Image (tube, rainbow, N blue to C red):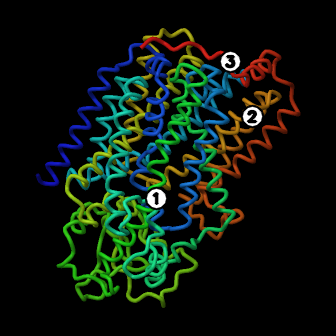
Amino acid sequence: MSLDALTFLFVGGSFALYIGIAIWARAGSTKEFYVAGGGVPPIANGMATAADWMSAASFISLAGLVSFIGRDGSAYLMGWTGGYVLLALLLAPYLRKFGKFTVPDFIGDRYYSQTARTIAVVCTIVISFTYVAGQMRGVGIVFSRYLHVDINTGVIIGMAIVFFYAVLGGMKGITYTQVAQYCVLILAFTVPALFLSAQVTGHILPQIGLGATLDNGMSVLATLDQLSMDLGFAQYTAGKKSTLDIFCLTVALMCGTAGLPHVIVRFFTVPRVKDARISAGYALVFIALLYTAVPGVAGFGRVNLIQTLNGTDNSGTAYAEMPAWFKNWENTGLLAWQDRNGDGRVQYSAGAAFAGKPSFIDGRGENDERLTDNAISDPGFDASKQPFANEVYVDRDIMVLANPDIAQLPNWVIALVAAGAVAAALSTAAGLLLVISTAIAHDLMKKTINPNISEKQELLYARLAAIVAICIAGYFGINPPGFVAQVVALAFGLACASVFPAIILGIFWKRHNSAGAIAGMLVGLVSTMAYMYYFAFAGGTPAEYFMGISPGGFGTVGAVLHIVVGAVVSMATAEPPQEIQDIVEDLRIPRGAGEAHSH
């Protein structure tokens, strides 16, 4: 069967499954729409949480990011997995015991303030829209390659699919859909990873493949170091970021993970406090299956890419002899070649592949990092070390999707990867859109603007808000501000600076009051957003970074500012009411959590 036929079969079959589950599990009440009735079994919730978490950034972009930046990518691996340890130990059981549907609900009640609730709603919406932009771009990338449509059309198709099971099914439909999506995406990532590891190293497990010895007598990592230096790139295992920047980025990703609204809400869907902690443990195991394979997939893919483009002798490959995958990805605009020396050979090295702005990059300047392949802005870049001028532009986001093509794996593996990538992007997009609609309908309309609306009206507002959110998310997917993983990292920085400290202080410090929470959230959110905006959109350069900390890592600084300002303001103002302090004391005692809603 042809690749196109298999892709349509795998992707179409998975879509039919997701929509069928959404119809079967259609929400009939606000509790089912918001938290799936509060009766999801821990193992199912763990799988749903893993699918919610392993977004397009994890499935599509993370291995590509590590493949291109080497050691510096370890911050993403440590941060995005370590955050789940914080979540399981410091947040999940306490939030489940508090018994509210959403993060703004917790903050509004804990800090006895509608203003705090409204600021938390704003934080939630900003974080979720920043995150969802990456997911919708991921959907567009997959469809542009495998369904032979442009990226914009691919985003619109993804919007239509999410509409069905997010708007109709709510959290109940999304939860059981995400269980199916986890099974699809973990198979789609691990099967080609096993193939690649066996093909490149002779070891079937990608987790141990990086240390394997290749035919050249060197390990995979040593080979990558050598290839990188031969072509003018920074040493793969050395990296460019300072230790402080790596530390701040890791902390921002860890705390951001623990503070992401669409992940936190998953722990309101289980029956008991104990189940919240157990489901967090299951989620960590399910996530580790993918994350421990990422370094190997990144390394194997990088070796395969360089050797396919440049040949084993680094002299380049004749364009006429390039395999079909190269031309297929050229058609998407995510890979491009310019014959700069007129020899008809594809030659890949550090440096910009295009002197001006290529026509396939909408709205990008010629100095955009996407066109430089980390070379022009790299202080370690040395053009004298290049064997030839770079002629190839490779979008990092294609690496996982292109790996099976490059390695010439069977068509069914390539089709499986396509289905998995779509599952990863859509599962997270649906969770985020539900959080946005819940924040608007429940926290803004019901709790703040008009407390007298009926449950039926609240459910209608939630669905209308989800429709509007899908449209806005589609716009960001069509006009993304950068790579999938980089866009997503900004969302983590915002969560780290705004939501996470407010929740932690609310659980563990009964003296923290509404004035301190409001001041801290505003300082954390505004300072982090301003820093990110300046460097992402207002022309800021790396030379201007505060203490060398990149925008992705500034969330750590924002969190420190949040905690300091919040503590100072709390100590300078009146204590919280005694009943609030009693609630905080009781919150940390592991008993009582409410019964599950019937399913």
Earlier in the chain: of badge 2 and badge 1, it is: 1
Residue 591 numbered tag: 3
Q: Find out whether the residues at labels 2 and 1 contact each other: C-beta distance under 8 Å.
A: no
Q: Find out whether the residues at labels 2 and 3 contact each other: C-beta distance under 8 Å.
A: no
Considering depth in this image, is 439 or 598 the residue closer to the camera? 598
Which picture quadrant has residue 497?
Answer: top right
Q: Amino acid at mark 1?
A: Gln
Q: Is residue 354 left or right of residue 6?
A: right
| Mark 1 crowdedness (10 Å alpha carbons): few <14, some 14-19, many ≥20 | many
Residue 72 screen position, x and y as percent: 56, 65
Q: Amino acid at mark 3?
A: Arg
Q: Which residue is mark 1?
A: 207
Considering depth in this image, is 425 or 302 the residue closer to the camera? 302
Secondary structure at numbered mark 3: loop
Picture layout, residue 538 above or below residue 511: below
Residue 326 screen position, x and y as percent: 24, 69
Earlier in the chain: of badge 2 and badge 3, it is: 2
Q: CA distance from mark 1 to mark 3?
A: 40 Å
Q: Amino acid at mark 2?
A: Leu
Secondary structure at numbered mark 2: helix
Q: Which residue is located at x 55 percent, y 48 percent?
A: 81
Q: Which residue is located at x 12 percent, y 54 percent?
A: 2
Q: Which residue is mark 2?
A: 505
Q: Which residue is located at x 48 percent, y 35 percent?
A: 49
